[in-house]
Amino acid sequence: MPGTSTDEIWSELTDVERTGLTSAACRVYGRALLATEHQYDVVVDESLVAACVPASVLAEYGTDKAKEAVPCIMAVRTAELDHHIKFAVMEEGIKQLVILGAGLDTRAWRLPWLTGVKVWEVDSGSVEPLKQKLLLGGNSSKLKASLACASRTFIKADLEQVALPAMLTAAGYDASKPTVFLVEGLIGYLSYNQGNVLFAQLHAAAAPGSFLIASAPPNLAMREGCAKHGVQTHHQVYEEPEQTEARLLAAGWTCRLISAADQCAKYQVEGMVSPLLICRRPHGPPPPAATTAAKTTAALLAAAPTSARAAAATPASVPAPTPVPAGNSAADAVWAGLTDVERTALQVSLYRLKGAELLKEGQRYDPRYDAALTDMCMPKARQDDLLSLGPPLGIPMMAIRTAEIDHQMLSAVNSEPQPRQVVILGAGLDPRAWRLAWPAGTSLFEVDTGSVEAMKSRVMGAAGFPLQAASRAHISFDLSQCSEGRLQAALSSAGYSPSLPSVWLCEGLIGYLTLDAGQALMQAAYDAAYEGSTLVMTAPPTAWMKKQAEEAGRKLHHVTIEEPKDLVKRLRSAGWSCHLNTGPALARKYGVDKYHQAQVVCRKGAQHGGRRSGMRRCSIM
């Protein structure tokens, strides 16, 4: 390091690096807040702080501040995280520990029970030279500290962009063995989409039985509390811990949320404390009950009706669960807090659930996922109201639409050149990430406003449904604003590769966009797709369908009404070659009297010599 004094060293550090050192100071001062049985070793942290932090900065975190905000947060967080790492190592026998955003984390030196454990520390590398000089400098080291673990490997990586599984493997990580992934104080510094990508990548790199132990990012109340103490935060994301939990569930992890209140009770402290998330790769045993906090997803499931609990333990071949019993107070409470958008999405889910009963054996999709959504979130009385006026036209429509899309999507991902990227536009409560048997290595990218994402992820996790895709990333994006490369940029930030084939789904969306916005979406999807990619799109209502709905007393809220042939023309003008499945053709295929919504299956093919040239004729299937 060019600087040798604490003032010189401090002046060369970034805000994030300074935060790491002040966190170490808070670990030191906060330790005194804990009872003796909960106190951790601070010898290494004390030496780091003494070597790098000026006295003027330390004065802000001295004994006069020890009972204020940040030292309390760091003390409890450190003790509780250490507790769960120890459980995984000592009780579960896990021998691999990966620390994300390691910075000046000193666990590789200070935790005596890491004997025999291999440690990988992943970070930008900005403080690694200092850390190595102080802790690994041999005779020149200012600290007389030895590694407590079997080995420590540092991986220099930008966690906003890196392909983490490949980088870990290249550094000697064994993906076949269970691992503890520690994500402390990091999530809030990543954007929403970058955090989702990290959760999905860790899930892909984790063997069954692995743990992900994470501190939740601060919420707005914590930010305001820190500001009152003169501590400014520099996070990108401020959210409630239940929102972080929902994102982890969406990536395929099972989760237990340990609240701030439970930690305060355990450690007998008052003040702000970071909620923690103890997550497990599915198919392993549940995480240990280390506090009085109830597992969030288990609590939600326990409050759900019997049919949803049965669905979680029922093989896929078993018919749909029985309807939710009347008087489900949990569903009443959930419904009361939903927006109009969320309630509409649940209505579609109810229609999918009921529609599965109309299909023949061999055509029927698994309805248990929609049963869980409706049972947990829609009161029985509301379900009865929607079904009381006779079979709604939406039920057969959803049945055929769902079955045919499933067929087209699975056919596409199992065809050459074997696309392993699936993009679902306007995903809403679409449960295909859990429901369909995706080929190994398939990554799903769900693009939507995010208005129902938390609800879907919590219900899928509560029902115990394992993620069938290798990874799932939710991307919060306004699909009416797809021009100028915005859509591709959002996808790429979540790990999507435009240089690999993909399969795209646009179900029930295009009619809610203006003609211009819809055209921009078609073009954006084409531009982001590699040669050989597939797009499946449902047609918007026709003028005849709109008239029929109005005569039946139903108002459609679509802004685009057009004939399927006109939709095909627009898709072709964006570069896609098209195959049209007409409503009558689908009615014949699925053995129903009437069906009116067409679907278009599109292809971006190298054989056509580039965009807008050599397009096939639109054909009727």
Image (cartoon, rainbow, N blue to C red):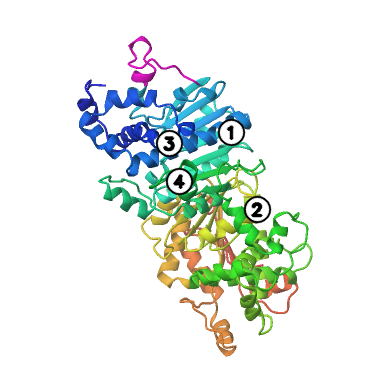
Q: Is 303 in front, or is 205?
A: 303
Label 2 – label 4 distance at C-alpha: 32 Å
Between tags 1 and 2, which lies in front?
A: 1
- Label 1 sits on a secondary structure element that is helix
Q: Is residue 243 above or below residue 402?
A: above
Q: Is residue 144 magenta?
A: yes
Q: Looking at numbered disc 2 in the image, what kind of residue is underneath it?
A: Phe
Q: Looking at numbered disc 1 in the image, what kind of residue is underneath it?
A: Ala
| Mark sitting earlier along the chain (1/2) | 1
- Label 2 sits on a secondary structure element that is loop
Q: Which residue is mark 1?
A: 88
The boundaries of the magenta stretch are: 132-148
Label 1 – label 4 distance at C-alpha: 23 Å
**Which numbered marker is on residue 34?**
3
Q: Is 300 in front, or is 311?
A: 300
- Tell me the crowding category of disc 4: few under 14, some 14 to 19, or many 20 or more residues within 10 angstroms, Cα based: some
